[in-house]
Image (cartoon, grey):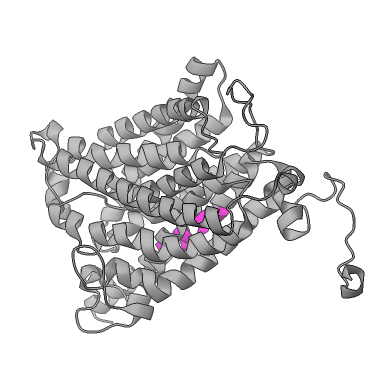
């Protein structure tokens, strides 16, 4: 093999491994969310991750990938439906020297993660049919539009917005959709008292929550380091370094903050601190020095815990704190590059300008703020229109009786833990049904 062929093979292998790592994050979400919610909904919560990724796979293949990366205008891609390549169709990805099939799988994994984040706001009370409808629309009309703006040759990318692996494109989008769903669905039964004070609804398995969080931590190396789309120059190792430092800082920052604020070293808070730090460093991982990665991770971990309590006290029932972990931290991470982007790394990546701390002025900071606000407004408006329409037509929420009995039994006919919940044997024969 020639050196060029060896380079292509190594790059292709690295990006394929990274895609698998990111796809495996769906297992992390399944454990994290199931462990963080009640036993009577555990099978439903875990199972929807498979449903979610299946919906995303088909919708992104048919339309989403073309809208994100296909040639078009400053707002959307207009070519490349069903992954059909033509001359110049996917020029926005021409910088990566791997086959289109691998590029698609890698980018699909990102779209799947964003949709998985959105589902956090639906947890324990949304109809299964809503997952089919909103999941399809999100993957076609919401996620790809912001993806095109930043990564596909759209207006934010042309401004020089720095979002290396998707703090805004992936995480902020999913989080805002989750927040809109949380507000329109309303709180879970029993979450708030008449005087609006919140009641704790603890998850049924902290061990699952921790294992899920750690799977996500490992999968994030594919998420961030894989976004280099090459193994040749070894830069993926540097991206992995900043990613890991931020996550470690987020864990410590969050558990210390919890101890200070509530008097207990809360385990779920520590896990969410890791995730918030990972979300925040996702935009900045290729642009900042290691010390800045620690700062970004620590700030995200602490601030996310505080905001999770704040929003809950304001009457918002976000079961897994999706907006705090992925939305607030996503905004922090995206804006932070405007402060901490290092001149040497900006030059190496060729994206944007140096941050304010390095004397780069306010330009990059303003670009980052515009990107966060622009993406946030679009996702909020479109998500609201879609979910409000669904609410007024088919309805978003299961009945009170179904919610109390649990979505495992009401939507799927069986509990995730039948022995513990005294689940009776169901005769599934057609004659019995009659």
**Residue 48 shown left or right of residue 311 in the figure:** right
**Residue 289 shown left or right of residue 276 in the figure:** left
Q: Position of residue 403 (x, y in %)?
A: 70, 45
Magenta stretch secondary structure, dominant: helix
* Image point (42%, 54%), residue name: 385
Q: Position of residue 323 (x, y in %)?
A: 44, 40
Considering the image in quadrants, where does the C terminus appear? bottom right
Res 412 quadrant in image: bottom right
Q: Is residue 292 above or below residue 157?
A: above
Question: Is residue 110 one of those drawn in magenta?
Answer: no
- Depth order, front residue of 13/249: 249
- Depth order, front residue of 118/213: 118
* Image point (74%, 54%), residue name: 410
Is residue 356 at least partly visible in the picture?
A: yes
Q: Position of residue 67 (x, y in %)?
A: 31, 69
Q: Position of residue 214 (x, y in %)?
A: 53, 44
Residues drawn in magenta: 18-27
Question: Is residue 19 one of those drawn in magenta?
Answer: yes
Res 99 quadrant in image: bottom left
Is residue 289 at least partly visible in the picture?
A: no
Q: Is residue 38 above or below residue 161?
A: above
Query: Looking at the image, which residue sits at the far front?
Result: 392
Considering the image in quadrants, where does the N terminus appear? bottom left
**Residue 55 shown left or right of residue 434 in the figure:** left
* Image point (56%, 26%), residue name: 266
* Image point (75%, 46%), residue name: 401
**Residue 10 shown left or right of residue 216 in the figure:** left
């Amino acid at each position: 093999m020639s050196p060029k062929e060896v380079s292509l093979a190594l790059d292709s292998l690295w990006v394929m491994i990274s895609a698998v790592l990111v796809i495996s994050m769906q297992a992390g979400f399944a454990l994290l969310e199931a462990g963080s919610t009640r036993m009577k909904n555990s099978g439903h919560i875990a199972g929807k991750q498979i449903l979610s990724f299946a919906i995303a796979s088909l919708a992104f293949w048919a339309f989403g990938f073309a809208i994100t990366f296909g040639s078009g205008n400053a707002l959307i891609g207009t070519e490349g439906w069903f992954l059909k390549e033509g001359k110049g169709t996917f020029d926005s990805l021409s910088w990566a020297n791997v086959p289109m099939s691998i590029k698609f799988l890698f980018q699909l994994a990102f779209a799947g993660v964003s949709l998985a984040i959105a589902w956090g706001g639906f947890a324990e009370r949304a109809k299964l049919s809503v997952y089919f409808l909103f999941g399809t629309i999100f993957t076609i009309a919401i996620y790809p539009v912001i993806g095109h703006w930043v990564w596909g040759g759209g207006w934010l990318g042309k401004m020089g917005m720095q979002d290396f692996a998707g703090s805004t494109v992936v995480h902020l989008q999913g989080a805002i959709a989750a927040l809109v769903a949380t507000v329109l669905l309303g709180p879970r039964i029993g979450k708030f008292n008449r005087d609006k004070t919140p009641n704790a609804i603890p998850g049924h398995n902290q061990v699952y929550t921790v294992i899920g969080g750690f799977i996500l931590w490992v999968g994030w190396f594919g998420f961030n380091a894989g976004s280099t789309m090459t193994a040749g120059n070894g830069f993926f190792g540097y991206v992995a370094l900043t990613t890991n430092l931020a996550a470690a800082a987020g864990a410590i920052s969050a558990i210390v903050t919890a101890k200070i604020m509530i008097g207990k070293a809360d385990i779920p808070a520590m896990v969410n601190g890791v995730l918030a730090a990972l979300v925040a460093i996702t935009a900045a991982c290729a642009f900042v020095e290691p010390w800045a990665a620690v700062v970004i991770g620590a700030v995200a971990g602490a601030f996310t815990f505080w905001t999770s309590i704040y929003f809950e006290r304001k009457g918002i029932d976000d079961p897994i704190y999706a907006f705090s972990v992925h939305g607030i931290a996503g905004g922090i991470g995206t804006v932070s590059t405007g402060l901490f982007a290092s001149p040497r790394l900006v030059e190496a990546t060729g994206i944007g300008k140096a941050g304010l701390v390095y004397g780069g002025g306010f330009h990059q900071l303003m670009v980052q703020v515009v990107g966060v606000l622009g993406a946030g407004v679009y996702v909020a408006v479109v998500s609201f229109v879609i979910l409000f329409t669904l609410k007024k037509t088919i309805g978003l929420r299961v009945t009170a009786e179904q919610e109390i009995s649990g979505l495992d039994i009401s939507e799927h006919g069986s509990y995730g833990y039948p022995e513990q919940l005294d689940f009776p044997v169901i005769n599934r024969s057609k004659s019995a049904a009659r």
